[in-house]
Image (cartoon, grey):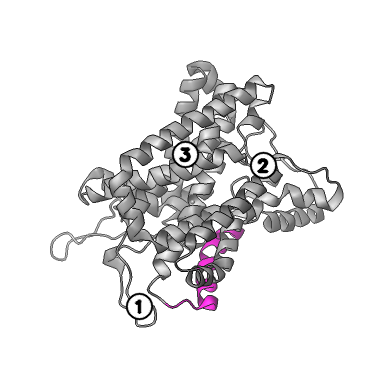
């Protein structure tokens, strides 16, 4: 289940302690949760992984789809994280819906519009779409409305829906205080019903079929995870006590749930289900695994946070990665697409497994490099959801020349397969 307040920032980051400011209008900020930084970084690493694997292997590759069936937890994890952070941040502060919407939606909505235009323009320049100017403009309007400019952008569209609903979610949690287990139970029942509905779609035609196809860009298939994250934040002290006491059991249960998910996947393959279909994200049997791996990642993050030292390389890398998360999310599909011509050579020269691993490293490195560039240009806020980083020039001695130095970090898809829902 995204940065100060950005989604992907799928879920917004909590502000660093050093950056806190007393504000009578908003109230004191709560302690910074470093475990969420690691949660975000690990989940984003898996986002890149599922896209690299899915767009560099054959859709009939059983092993590749098996890996993707486990990595598909990422969208649910980020929506849980979104609900968690929103409730955690707003717990001690009054919520003014208008101000909240203007700030939150702008931080996600502006990058969403900017990258929708970028990917739309890329599809025209590269000849992916050959059409009249009028048709191209109408396509852009439709893609902005449905999150379809590129395969990852739907996530920001759903995140903005979560922001719109958050004042109602907060009211619901306050009104049902003491009975949140029942709220979660009802939400889980709705989630299972939705997944069964998606797994066995009705026969539809015309506009109804179009609405059904775009159901994944609504909050409905993810509402349980948003509420689960929100309720977890409401009861964070109890959650942390459970994690501290039963952490090894949570991690062990996560591993067992993953093994069970793989077993079901292999059973479906044995029954003749195509691998790409058997690895789809909207399958009811994957729900326990998604819930457990979200808990498992939080557990690992909390263990790390309790032993974290700010002067270590890992702590700095995690902080930097969390800060760059939205930019990485938005940019990495373009880097992957630009590398499409070398994918056959990589898999041929190194073999499928090693070739995919090399591609992953190159995509990750290229994306981080590109994100660093974007963070240092005037349009950084529009493209990454984070303000531009400024290079500070050190003063060398008294009245000596100042020389520029390298800045110090401050802490469509490959056309290889067609699936009904984006990876």
Q: How many marks?
A: 3
Q: Which mark is residue 421?
A: 2
Cα gap from disc 3 to disc 1, whole angstroms: 36 Å
Q: Give the quadrant of the C terminus.
A: top right
Residue 93, quarter of picture: bottom left
Horizontal and vertical percent position of residue 175:
51, 72
Q: In the shown orientation, is residue 212 left or right of residue 339?
A: right
Q: Secondary structure at mark 2?
A: loop
x 59%, y 47%: residue: 152
- Decide which of tag 3 and tag 1 comes sooner along the chain: 1
Q: Disc 1 on helix, strand or loop?
A: loop
Q: Which residues are magenta?
A: 94-114
* Viewer-proximal residue among 199 and 407: 199
| Of the image marks 2 and 1, the number of the one nearer the N terminus | 1
Spatial separation of the CA atoms under disc 2 and disc 3: 18 Å
Residue bearing the label numbered 1 = 27
Mark closer to the observer (3, 1): 1
- Residue 385 vs residue 253, the one in the foreground: 253
Front position in the image: 418 or 281: 281
Residue 59 showing in the rendered view: no
Q: Residue furthest bottom?
A: 24
Q: Are marks 3 and 1 in contact (CB under 8 Å)?
A: no
Which of the two discs, 2 and 3, labels the residue nearer the N terminus? 3
Residue at mark 3: 46
65 drawn magenta: no
Under circle 3, the secondary element is helix
Classify residue 255 as left or right of residue 395.
Answer: right
**Residue at the extreme left:** 398
Quarter of the rendering containing residue 300: top left
What's the magenta bit mostly, secondary-structure-wise?
helix
């Amino acid at each position: 289940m995204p940065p100060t307040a950005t989604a992907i920032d799928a879920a917004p980051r909590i502000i660093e302690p050093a950056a806190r400011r007393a504000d009578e209008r908003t109230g004191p900020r709560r302690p910074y949760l470093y475990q969420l930084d690691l949660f975000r970084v690990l989940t984003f690493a898996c986002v890149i992984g599922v896209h690299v694997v899915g767009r560099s292997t054959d859709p009939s590759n059983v092993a590749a789809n098996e890996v993707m069936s486990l990595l598909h937890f990422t969208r649910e994890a980020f929506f849980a994280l979104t609900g968690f952070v929103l409730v955690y941040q707003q717990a001690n502060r009054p919520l003014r819906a208008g101000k909240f919407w203007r700030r939150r939606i702008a931080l996600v909505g502006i990058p969403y519009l900017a990258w929708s235009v970028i990917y739309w323009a890329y599809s025209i320049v590269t000849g992916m779409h050959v059409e009249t100017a009028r048709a191209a403009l109408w396509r852009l309007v439709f893609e902005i409305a449905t999150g379809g400019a590129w395969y990852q952008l739907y996530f920001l569209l759903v995140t903005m829906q979560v922001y719109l609903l958050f004042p109602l979610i907060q009211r619901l949690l306050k009104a049902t205080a003491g009975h949140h287990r029942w709220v979660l139970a009802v939400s889980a029942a709705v989630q299972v019903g939705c997944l069964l509905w998606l797994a066995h779609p009705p026969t539809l035609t015309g506009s109804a079929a179009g609405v059904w196809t775009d159901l994944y860009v609504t909050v409905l298939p993810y509402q349980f995870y948003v509420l689960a994250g929100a309720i977890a934040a409401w009861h964070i002290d109890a959650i942390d006590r459970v994690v501290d006491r039963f952490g090894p059991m949570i991690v062990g249960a996560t591993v067992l749930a993953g093994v069970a998910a793989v077993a079901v996947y292999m059973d479906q393959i044995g029954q003749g289900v195509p691998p790409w279909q058997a690895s789809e994200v909207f399958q009811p049997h994957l729900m326990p695994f998604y819930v457990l791996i979200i808990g498992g990642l939080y557990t690992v993050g909390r263990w790390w946070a309790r032993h974290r030292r700010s002067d270590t390389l890992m702590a700095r890398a995690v902080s930097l990665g969390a800060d760059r998360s939205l930019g990485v999310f938005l940019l990495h599909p373009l880097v992957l697409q630009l590398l499409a011509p070398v994918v056959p050579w990589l898999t041929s020269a190194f073999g499928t497994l090693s070739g995919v691993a090399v591609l992953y490293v190159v995509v990750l490195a290229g994306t981080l490099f590109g994100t660093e560039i974007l963070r240092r240009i005037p349009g950084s806020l529009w493209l990454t959801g984070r303000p531009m980083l400024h290079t500070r020039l050190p003063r060398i001695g008294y009245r000596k020349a100042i020389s520029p130095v390298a800045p110090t970090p401050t802490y469509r898809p490959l056309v290889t397969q067609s699936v009904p829902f984006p990876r």
